[in-house]
């Protein structure tokens, strides 16, 4: 035998046994997104590397060390998307969708980051992404967060809580940045290597560091909140009172800065205590400067991303996944003529029972084997079609989940009567 090919580290197969949770999440999420008027779009998994460098920012973990970047055979620098916002904004610009228009968009798909794989942290993972483009807020900020809260309710997930913050305008961030640089420089000896590199370029990133050794330093840093410009203060106050009015509970975390450069004003994160260290299940924020930065006309926008694997894990832990639908009918066959006829009968029954499972025994087997397969399939009804039944123009009908005995039903009446046997 040849050597087995291994899966790529950090990239998962979602097997049929697990897919029920994914499908449940997708169904519920689509219904919630519909309820708020978000439209689905699909954008490529590969973009020009420059798109991510210019949007996410040079001094971020993603751009510094997590991107899957390569040159194609034509020498073009490309990257497997590490997140979806940049690609969606690129699509809105490329397709001439801005021009003062407003869009509510969502997208589902895989993202790629070269991180250290562990539970809840993979190199290919899925995100739901929502973006509201052309809305200055704070009304849309409130509505978008209410949407996420509704999604958790619809999924019956209770172990999630919301933290929010405001990063202010680009200008107020600039003055805070200087203040923070000053503070960090005066504690130079406590900085790790990453932080030293970021000090000049983007000191805010340092606040996002997950290094335990940096914790005390970060705790002592001046707060961005104290540098907010008046408009951002008013925006943030309106966000808080809007959430209060809707009964959406939150906690203000003045140290929440988020790991991407493009955010301004509102940022938020939903975290859980049920998944250990990988506790963020949904994160997002406002990015009023990004679209202009990528060459589109200045357009305010806000969005968030949900980590699908982490939500699937929460759903599974909470036992909130409805069982998969079993097939309704399993057709047991015996004899060459019956096998041919059974293929036709199965098609007729699939017409009569749209969307419900009609399984035909394939690949032969004696009655005992076939009934065992029928039982394992979860089907409620077995139909028995042998050459003897065929000669009489009937099929045997045998309930599998009740004690009733087998009866005969004329073949030409079966499609019309099948529902009454179930
Ligand atoms: P984290 O702090 O866990 O690294 P992040 O801030 O990098 O998250 P975002 O870039 O905001 O995450 O992505 C949005 C969501 O995508 C996260 O809240 C999380 O649920 C999920 N996510 C991010 N990175 C991964 C990953 N490597 N594997 C699985 N899910 C991920
Ligand atoms: Mg990360």
Image (cartoon, grey):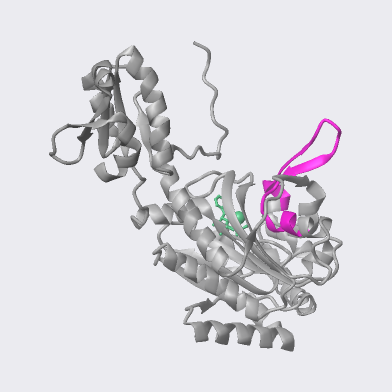
Q: Examine the image and state in which quarter residue 90 appears.
A: bottom right
Q: Examine the image and state in which quarter residue 220 appears.
A: bottom right
Q: Nearer the viewer, residue 15 or 396?
A: 396
**How many numbered discs, if any?**
0
Task: Tell whether 227 sits left or right of 124.
Answer: right
Q: Examine the image and state in which quarter residue 213 appears.
A: bottom right
Q: Quadrant of the C terminus?
A: top left
Residue visible at 34% across and 48% down? 323
Task: Tell whether 162 sits left or right of 342.
Answer: right
Residue visible at 69% across and 64% down? 205
Q: Is residue 33 above or below residue 413?
A: below
Residue 48 in view, yes or no? yes
Q: Is residue 375 above or below residue 141?
A: above
Q: Nearer the viewer, residue 323 or 291?
A: 323
**Is residue 82 inside the magenta stretch?**
yes
Residue visible at 51% across and 86% down? 245
Give, as a single range, the part of the protein colored magenta.
63-89
Q: Nearer the viewer, residue 321 or 328?
A: 328
- Residue reaching furthest to the top: 1
Q: Position of residue 45 (x, y in %)?
A: 69, 45
Residue visible at 53% across and 74% down? 146
Task: Tell whether 53 sits left or right of 131.
Answer: right
Q: Position of residue 277 (x, y in %)?
A: 47, 56
Residue 280 in view, yes or no? no
Q: Which corner quadrant of the figure contains ligand 2?
A: bottom right
């Amino acid at each position: 035998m040849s050597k087995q090919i291994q899966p790529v580290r950090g990239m998962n197969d979602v097997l049929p046994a697990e897919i029920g949770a994914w499908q449940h999440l997708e169904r519920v999420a689509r219904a919630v997104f519909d309820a708020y008027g978000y439209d689905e779009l699909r954008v490529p998994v590969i973009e020009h590397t420059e798109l991510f460098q210019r949007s996410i920012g040079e001094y971020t973990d993603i751009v510094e060390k997590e991107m899957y970047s390569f040159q194609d055979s034509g020498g073009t620098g490309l990257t497997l998307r590490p997140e979806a916002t940049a690609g969606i904004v690129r699509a809105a610009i490329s397709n001439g969708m801005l021009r003062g228009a407003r869009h509510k968009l969502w997208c589902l798909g895989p993202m790629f980051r070269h991180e250290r794989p562990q539970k809840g942290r993979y190199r290919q993972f899925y995100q739901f992404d929502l973006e509201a483009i052309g809305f200055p807020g704070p009304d849309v900020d409130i509505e978008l967060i209410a949407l996420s809260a509704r999604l958790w309710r619809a999924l019956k997930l209770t172990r999630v809580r919301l933290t929010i913050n405001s990063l202010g305008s680009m200008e107020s961030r600039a003055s805070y940045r200087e203040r923070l640089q000053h503070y960090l420089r005066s504690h130079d000896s406590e900085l790790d290597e990453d932080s030293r590199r970021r000090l000049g370029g983007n000191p805010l990133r340092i606040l996002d560091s997950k290094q335990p050794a940096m914790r005390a330093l970060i705790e002592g840093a001046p707060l961005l909140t104290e540098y907010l410009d008046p408009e951002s203060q008013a925006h943030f106050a309106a966000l808080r009172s809007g959430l209060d009015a809707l009964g959406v509970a939150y906690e203000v975390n003045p140290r929440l800065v988020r790991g991407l450069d493009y955010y301004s004003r509102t940022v938020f994160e939903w975290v859980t205590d049920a998944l250990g260290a990988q506790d963020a299940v949904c994160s997002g924020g406002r990015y009023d400067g990004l679209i202009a930065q990528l060459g589109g006309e200045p357009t305010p926008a806000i969005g968030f991303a949900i980590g699908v694997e982490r939500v699937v894990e929460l759903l599974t832990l909470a036992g909130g996944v409805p069982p998969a639908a079993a097939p309704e009918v399993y057709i047991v066959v015996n004899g060459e003529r019956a096998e041919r006829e059974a293929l036709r009968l199965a098609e007729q029954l699939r017409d009569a029972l749209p969307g419900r499972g009609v399984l035909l025994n394939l690949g032969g087997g004696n009655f005992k084997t076939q009934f065992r397969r029928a039982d394992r399939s979860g089907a409620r009804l077995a139909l028995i079609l042998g050459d003897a039944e065929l000669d009489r123009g009937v099929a045997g009908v045998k309930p599998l989940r009740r004690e009733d005995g087998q009866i005969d039903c004329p073949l030409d009446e079966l499609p019309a009567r099948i529902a009454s046997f179930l």
